[in-house]
Amino acid sequence: MNKIASIIIATVFAIIVLGGLAALIGGGLLGAIAFIIGIPVAFPMSTSIVILFFAVVIVRTMIEKRRERREMRAFLRDGDDN
């Protein structure tokens, strides 16, 4: 009876382990497929976000430089009157 019980326990354990292995492999394959499919979708979005960020930084820098020049001209113009 012990031999039959140990064979049944070993069989059940082997099925559980193989099921877990299949789930890991299947999940890994699904993850890899989702990653490969997601790259073309995510890449343009991330690229456009980076380009938009740098465009905002460049525009803000240009506006700040214009403001500084305007303030400097106003300061020099007011300084000549004294």
Image (cartoon, rainbow, N blue to C red):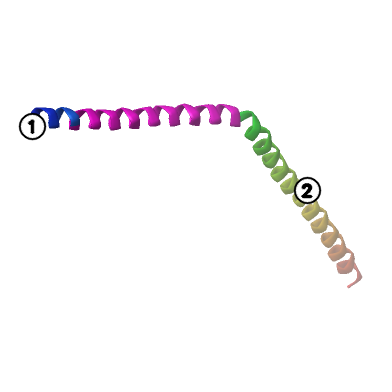
Question: Residue 2, which numbered label?
Answer: 1
Which residue occupies the extreme right position in the image?
A: 81
* Relative to 31, 14 lies left or right: left
| In the image: residue 24, left or right of residue 81 | left
> Which label sits in the foreground, 2 or 1?
1
* Left/right of residue 68 with respect to residue 43 in the rendered view: right
Bin the neighbour count of mark 1 within 10 Å (Cα to Cα): few under 14, some 14-19, many 20 and up. few
Magenta residue span: 9-38
Q: Nearer the viewer, residue 73 or 61?
A: 61
The quadrant of the rendering that contains the N terminus is top left
The picture places residue 27, in percent across and down from the top left corner, at 44, 31
- Residue type for callout 1: Asn
Which residue is painted at 79% across and 49% down in the image?
Answer: 62
Q: Position of residue 71 (x, y in %)?
A: 83, 62
Give the quadrant of residue 53. Answer: top right
> Residue at (18%, 32%) from the top-left corner?
9
Give the number of the disc on residue 59.
Answer: 2
Quadrant of the image containing the C terminus: bottom right
